[in-house]
Image (cartoon, rainbow, N blue to C red):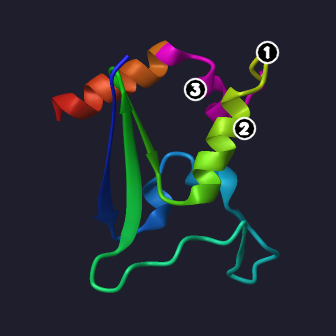
Amino acid sequence: MSVKYHFSYQPDWRTAPVAFWVHRPVDGSGAFDPPVPSAIPHKGFAFLHVEVDAAELVFSAPAQLEHFIDVLSKKPLPTGTSSLLHSLNRRSLLESRCDSCRAV
C-alpha cells in the first residue's frame, strides 16, 4: 500500500468532498458547527490531499478528517441512503472517481 500526502490552497473550503456532511449551518446565522476552517491570508484555504494507492482523499478541515476516520473505523460500516456513506462503502467508486480526476 502506497500512501502519499500533500497540501494545496483553494479559494473555497466547501469544495472538499466531505465538507457538506461535516459542517452544518446553525439556524441561518452564517455560522457552522463544527466551525469552518480559516483562510490563510494571500493563499486561501489549506487542503490536505492523501493518496492511498489509486484513491485520493481531500479534506479542508481537521473536523472532516476526524469524521472520515470515525465513519471508516465502525465495524460493520454504516449503511444508509446518504451519498457519503454510500461512497464510503464502495471502494470501487472512490477508485473510479480518482481515475476520472486523473484523466482530466
Mark 2 residue type: Asp
Q: CA distance from mark 3 to mark 2?
A: 15 Å
Residue at (67%, 72%) from the top-left corner? 35
Q: Where's the N terminus, which quadrant?
A: top left
Tell which residue pokes out farthest to the left in this image: 104
Q: Which residue bears the numbered disc 1?
A: 76
Residue count near mark 3 (Cα–Cα under 10 Å), binned few <14, some 14–19, many ≥20: few
Q: Is residue 3 magenta?
A: no
Mark 3 residue type: Ser
Q: Is residue 87 magenta?
A: yes
Residue count near mark 1 (Cα–Cα under 10 Å), binned few <14, some 14–19, many ≥20: few
| Residues tagged 3 and 2 counted as in contact (Cβ below 8 A) | no
Q: Earlier in the sequence, mark 1 or mark 2?
A: 2
Mark 1 residue type: Pro
Query: Magenta stretch?
Result: 79-91
Residue at (28%, 23%) from the top-left corner? 99
Q: CA distance from mark 1 to mark 3?
A: 15 Å
In the structure shown, which secondary structural element does the residue marked by tag 3 occupy?
A: helix
Q: Which residue bears the numbered disc 2?
A: 70
Residue 44: where, in percent of width, then height? 34, 75
Q: Which residue bears the numbered disc 3?
A: 87
User: Is residue 68 rendered to the left or right of residue 16?
Assistant: right
